[in-house]
Image (spheres, helix red, strand yellow):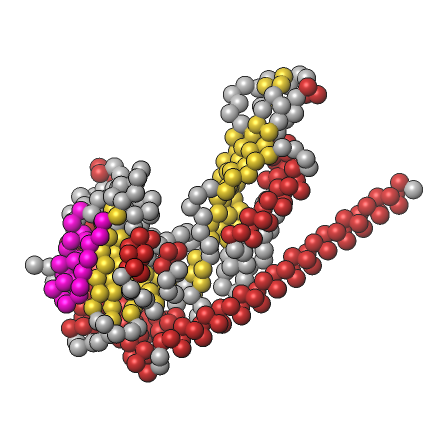
Amino acid sequence: MTDATDPVELAQALIRCRSVTPEEGGALVLLSGILKEAGFETHIETFREEGTPDVANLYARIGTTEPVLLLAGHTDVVPPGDLSAWSSDPFAAEIREGFLYGRGAVDMKGGIAAMTAAALRYLGEGGTGSIAFLITGDEEGPSINGTPKILAWAEQKGEKFAHCLLAEPSSRNRIGDEIKIGRRGSLSGLITVHGVQGHVAYPKQASNPIRPLMAILSALMRPLDYGTPHFERSNLEVTSVDVGNETTNLIPAKATARFNVRFNDAHTLDSLKALLVERIEHAAEGVRYDIEFLAGASSSFLAEPGPFVDTISGAILAETGERPLLSTGGGTSDARYIKNHCPVVELGLTNATMHKVDECVPVEDLELLTRIYKRIIERYFAQAASKPLETVVESSRLAAISVESDLEAALEAALNAEAERREEAAEAAANALNKGKA
């Protein structure tokens, strides 16, 4: 029988469940049984969509009052790869020299174990409040039948969440040195420039699409903004340029390029698309092109610093002696879905070995993270009892709206100033050139 208040023992039990995405592998069944025994009402819901694998998801809740603190994560893991490269079976969950080894030890069965142990310790000591778990089996896969659908299912059941703590491995060098209070948005696109195929010896009888494509890409890679208070600069990277031409004497008929933008809260998806199209149109100079924005785009989001973030930071400070860095960097996570339902902050294990051969976590880190999670839960419900959470949420929302308006105005002013500076420089250079000719 697994002692679910011991994060190491529970992490071992979860790692031994071979839940390589999209397989459930017994991990959600294990958690469901543990939470049900602790008094949670549990549901394992399987969602399906044509062309994608069926995926099981767990929702569990204890308590009937407001606010509801949502604890979220995933039990699916990436494949282990070459088994011979591992120093031990990736699903054996061996402990050696103070480290727990196994696929998912960091991402994120270790975090789920710590979160579960923390909640059970809190409740076992007489703690009160409404706690919900939302655990998917589709974070490492296409993310179609996972978190978005279990959230929609919960909403249809009338479930409402005040805040969410996500067990994503956010820490860099030590537990709690960094928490994610937001994420950049992501937008991918495919540009096709059309030319006229022909022989390289007769360029006037052809039209090479590579030249205008290069001009377009150069225009796209100019700065998109200069950063915002909680986000670094938006960044566009060209990820491929293709013409499908294996010869050296043929001018191709078309050239394509793919790109991805990781963007901050200075842009919405619509405003960013409009900006990119404007730059493409200007750089194309009448050349025929197509632009396709690819599926899977997501907007940036931010859990505005305030009581919830302070609760998490304070718990980390109490356990480690240091405050965390409030970060919005990195890639995407299921927080991009949760943020549509409530503010979400990501806090988990250090991420140095996630997805790697011999993925591992220090055993002492699991215990430390459990203590931090438990302290967060304690402080959260103590704060909720002293101040209505609706007041906190609404004040944070209004502050976010005000900040967003200020940021948009500041960004527009900065971009206009930069454009004017460049125009003045170009005009001065042209005047100097004309004076020299005279």
Measured as percent of width and height from the top left, residue 140 is found at 31, 47
Measured as percent of width and height from the top left, residue 201 is found at 66, 16
Q: Quadrant of the N terminus?
A: bottom left
Q: Nearer the viewer, residue 398 or 108?
A: 398
Residue extending farthest to the right is 438
Residue 324 seen by the camera: yes
Query: Residue sitting at 62 percent across and 27 percent down?
Result: 195
When asked about the image quadrant of residue 69, the answer is: bottom left
Query: Residue sitting at 51 percent across and 59 percent down?
Result: 265
When asked about the image quadrant of residue 40, the answer is: bottom left
Query: Residue sitting at 30 percent across and 39 percent down?
Result: 50
Q: Nearer the viewer, residue 6 or 64?
A: 64
Query: Residue sitting at 27 percent across and 41 percent down?
Result: 53
Highlighted magenta segment, given as a residue range:
25-46
Q: Is residue 223 magenta?
A: no
Q: Is residue 246 above or below residue 86?
A: above
Measured as percent of width and height from the top left, residue 106 is found at 27, 54
